[in-house]
Each structure stands twice: as structure tokens, then as C-alpha cells.
Amino acid sequence: MAKNLGRESDGTGLVIVLLLVAGMLLTCSRPVRGLSTGFYSYTCPDLESTVKNGVDSAVASDPRVGASILRVHFHDCFVDGCDGSVLLDDTTSFIGEKGAPQNANSLRGFGAIDDIKSSVEAICPGIVSCADILTIAARDSVVNAGGPSWDVELGRYDSLTASKSDAVASLPSPLSDLSTITGNFANVGLSETDLVALSGAHTFGKAQCGAFVGRLYDFQGTGSPDPTIDPTYLQTLQANCPDGGDGSVLNNLDQGTPTAFDNSYYNNLLVNKGLLNSDQVLESTSGSTTTQNLVTSFGGDQSSFFSQFSASMLKMGRISPKSSSNGQIRTNCRVVNSA
């Protein structure tokens, strides 16, 4: 069967490809909303190596940026699909997603995506969407930190707008309970298994004190710390995040191997050393038996975690991709192309 040869132009919703194979002329068409691996094999054959080089360079300059790029991809897909909407700056016609409480002053890595987009435009102008670049960069960020690789599915178009209110309604919060988080995931077609696997992205990266300080001093209005936090770990966190102190101070999400993508995150949860409330509730006694069992399973079997994480990333990447009828290939990821 002929391979999908990728997007020919921004104005076509259906790509028709003629390929001579074994002396026969074969015709292959791509569904408007379909995604496929190797989508740019012919129209931008150096795409994935270019993105990888960009990610590796960005991480070499800023070791935090790999985890940041992965988080940007999550926050993009949860709000109206994986369409690069989170990358858009505010305009006079819309207030975008960057200002939502779940993103403001914490979502980062946009400069790295800008640089990678510029490199891709230099070799394949007008061909590759920002949404696809972000999807590849998220995978490469995981690989760079020692995590699994998978064949990304590509062929997305970029959104024409963004919505702060949609982000507020759709994105999980580090303060959320399990029922709320499970609902956030279910709303975009992701299961409890996907929730636990994708939460494993917190095996690297950092979080600000402001994202969890309530657990340390006044958990759910009790005037006391969250009783599920390991006492020694609580003391460490209180020393780093004093009550009324600087909420922007950074803390490792993973207490075991904070810069490596591995299964240490789950073993933190098993000994009550999850940093965020949204992490620890996956294993808490008041939580779900399903999530508890998965935490235990992934904590004991890294290959199982890697396999499920890859599968769940692919599943998340399929959320509501844009087509040429409701999207475009942005030249600059921060702004919609001029009419």
C-alpha cells in the first residue's frame, strides 16, 4: 500500500497522492480528520530529526524545559483538542489559554517551541503545523530524559483561536480530588488507566510552592497539614515552602530521580511522598481501587509503565484534531496567519 505522503498545501482538506510502486500507479487518499505515522515522510523528511535536535539543544540550555514541553502538550490537548491553541498569545479578539489559573506563571517552554518551529520553517515552509511540532517535541522530551519512544501520529492543523474559559473548565488542577480529575480525563475520552499512566509524567520536572502549599498548613480548611503526607517529607516541604512565603519557589516533583523519566514517581506515592494533591490521591486510601492497583503495578514494573504511557500518549494525541476546514498551518505558533 502506498504511504501517506503528507500535507501538500494549507488549502486542501484531502491529500491525493500518486506513487509509482513496482511499475504500478497507485492512488492514496487521507481522511480529512485522520492522523498517521510518517505523515511528512515525503513533504518534510527531516522533520523529526530537526525537532529532536531542537529539543536536545533546548534541554542542554535549560534542563527543566523537557518536562515543560511535555506539560504544554498535555495542556494543549485537554482544551479543544491537540491543535496548538495553548501556544497562541492573547489578541484583541480573544483571551487565550496562557492566562488560565492552571497555566498562568507556570506553563513554560514556549520559546523552545518557537525556536523549533523556526528551524522547521527553514527546511519545510508552510508544511508542518505547530500542533504536530509540539506532539513530536513532547515525545522527544520524554526520550531525552531516558523514557520510552513511540511513533507519533501526525497530520493536525492549528487552531484559529483560543479560549481562557475553555482552559479553566477543562484542565485538571493540582488541588483537585480524584473524582474531579477523573472527570477531566473522561471528558476528553481518557480512562482511569490513562490518568494514572499520564500522571507518571511527573516523574521529572518541578512545581512551585503555590501549587501545593495548602497541603502543608491548612489542608481543606482544617488548619492542619494533609495527614497523608509522610511526616519527614512534610518537614522538608515546610522548610522549603514556609507558610506565607514565596509561592514561586521550585520543588522536585519526583523525590527519587528528579531529572530522569522512570517509574520512581509511583514509588513516591506508595510511601506518601507525592508532591501534589492530584498525585497522591491516585494512591490514597480514599481513592479508587483501580488507580491504587495501577500505582502499585507501575511502581513495580517500569516496562509496564513505559508501555502504557506510550499508548496513552497516542490516545491523548488523537483528541479532536483540526482539519483544513477549521484550522491552518501557522507560520508563527503564537499568532494566527493573516487573512
Image (cartoon, rainbow, N blue to C red):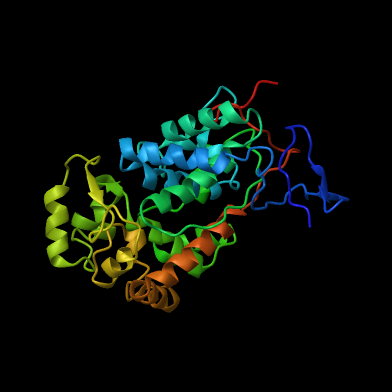
- Residue 118 lies left or right of residue 80; in this view the side is left
The answer to whether residue 187 of the structure is visible from this angle is: no
The residue lying at 43 percent from left, 43 percent from top is 69
The residue lying at 32 percent from left, 72 percent from top is 284
Instruction: Locate the C terminus by quadrant.
Output: top right
The answer to whether residue 206 of the structure is visible from this angle is: yes
Q: Residue furthest right?
A: 24
The residue lying at 41 percent from left, 65 percent from top is 178
Q: Residue furthest front?
A: 23
- Residue 295 lies left or right of residue 183; in this view the side is left
Q: Where 140 sits versus 113, above or below?
A: below
Residue 168, position in %: x, y?
A: 48, 45
- Residue 106 lies left or right of residue 339; in this view the side is left
Q: Where 21 sits versus 123, above or below?
A: below
The residue lying at 73 percent from left, 32 percent from top is 10
Residue 216, position in %: x, y?
A: 20, 56
Residue 136, position in %: x, y?
A: 53, 46
Q: Nearer the viewer, residue 247 or 243?
A: 247
Residue 310, position in %: x, y?
A: 50, 61
Instruction: Locate the N terminus by quadrant.
Output: bottom right
Count of marks placed on residues: 0
